[in-house]
Amino acid sequence: MRMNIVQKILSATSFVLLPLLAHAGAVDQLHDFLKNTRTLKAEFSQAVISRNGRKPQQSSGTVAISRPGKLRWEIVKPYPQLVVGDGEKIWIHDPELQQVTVRKAGQAIGSSPAALLSGNNDLEKNFTLKDAGEAEGMAWVDATPKAGDSGFEKVRLGFSGGDLKAMELFDSFGQTTQIRFSKMERNPALPATTFKFTPPAGADVVGE
């Protein structure tokens, strides 16, 4: 289950902090975000809900992104876990297991939702985008991957009061990942060290 959460982390980083324009549809907001946002950071809470509806698996932490291709998604509670992308490689560090998994960025992200943020602005090449109306006090956009092997059926993003407040990821195994964002900042100055990672001494490094 923990590795499933890590895969969702890679995907979830693509949709954070999209701005809401007063008279623009959700799809237009996504395009505007990619055009005008260079960096961002926020706090998040996340719940993974299984197909059988058992008690959700909860986690929380922080996220930072620098386009193109750099990200840092850090789970603080209940179990520390860190994902760092430096533009060339993706590093996944599990302190409890003393393990680091490293992959080429293109292989790790590919046509997953993360490509919407860290890739270029040609969204319709890999995703079908559509406005999904309003629900729960938010305006929603759906992003459906065109590739059959992305691992996701759909991603929904909810906007309220000028910010992205909610994201829901529906994977191919019937699980739903719900993410809520807070303390959002667009285009903050982020130190270069934010997106650098060196495996700690003694860690088992697996992959590239």
Image (cartoon, rainbow, N blue to C red):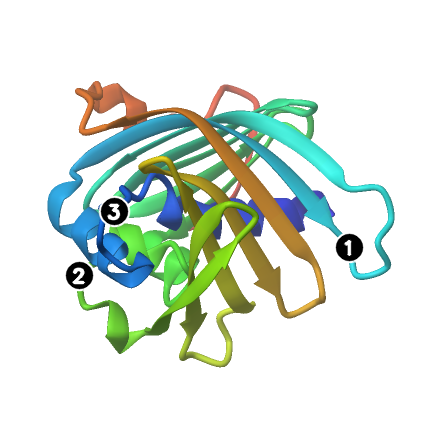
Apparent side of residue 16 relative to residue 174 in the rendered image (left or right): left
Residue picked out by circle 2: 121
Relative to 196, does residue 88 appear above or below in the rendering? Answer: below
Task: Kindly identify the residue that appears in the image at 61 percent across and 24 percent down.
Answer: 95
Cα–Cα span, label 1 and label 2: 32 Å
Residue 197 visible to the viewer: no
Give the residue type that dot 1 points to: Ser
Q: Disc 1 or 2, which lies upstream in sequence?
A: 1
Depth check, front residue: 99 or 121: 121
Q: Which mark is residue 202?
A: none
Q: Quadrant of residue 56?
A: top right
Q: Position of residue 149 (x, y in %)?
A: 51, 76
**Tag 1 near tag 3, CB within 8 Å:** no
Label 1: few (<14), some (14–19) or many (≥20) C-alpha neighbours in 10 Å: some
In-image side of 96 versus 192 (left or right): right
- Label 1 sits on residue: 50
In which image quadrant can residue 65 be found? top left
Residue where numbered disc 3 is placed: 69
Give how far across and how far down residue 196 sits, in percent. Answer: 30, 28
Percent position (x, y) of residue 23? 22, 53
Characterize the local packing of mark 3: few (<14), some (14-19) or many (20 or more) Cα atoms within 10 angstroms.
Answer: many
Q: In front of the other: label 2 or label 3?
A: 2
Image height check: is 84 above or below 4?
above
Q: Secondary structure at mark 1?
A: loop
